[in-house]
Amino acid sequence: MSTQAAIVRVVKARKTVTHAALVSAVVSQLSGRFVPQVSDIKQNIDRLIEKEYMARDAEQMDVYRYLA
């Protein structure tokens, strides 16, 4: 849950963000508690896309947009 919260915080603050920038920001936010695996971050991004908190950009697949 903390990984999803960090992802939402980053995307909400930036409105649009690339995959690499999102992963980097999430790792830096959570490094005080634990170091998340990139695969776990990717799974949580997919869950948040399913929940419609965020979406992939139609033109650039490595860019995410905040929806909620």
Image (tube, grey):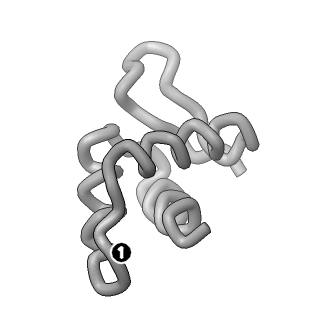
Q: Which residue is mark 1?
A: 30
Residue shown at the point (29%, 69%) measured from the top left? 35
Residue found at x 56% / y 60% = 4
Q: Secondary structure at mark 1?
A: helix
Residue 52 on image: x %, y %? 72, 40
Classify 36 as above or below 66. below
Please indicate whether residue 3 sits to the left or right of residue 26 in the image: right
Closest to the observer: 68 or 19? Answer: 19
Quick check: can you spot residue 13? no
In percent of width and height, residue 6 lies at: 48, 67
Q: Nearer the viewer, residue 1 or 22?
A: 1
The location of residue 55, given as percent across then percent down, is 59, 33
Task: Inspect this view and state whether residue 36 appears.
Answer: yes
Relative to residue 61, is residue 44 depicted above or below? Answer: below
> Compared with residue 61, is residue 18 higher up or lower down, i.e. above or below?
below
- Locate residue 62, reporting x and y percent: 35, 27
- Amino acid under label 1? Leu
Query: Residue at (42%, 56%) from the top-left corner?
Result: 14
Q: Is residue 47 left or right of residue 32?
A: right
Dot 1: few (<14), some (14–19), or many (≥20) neighbours within 10 Å? Answer: some
Foreground residue among 48 and 67: 48
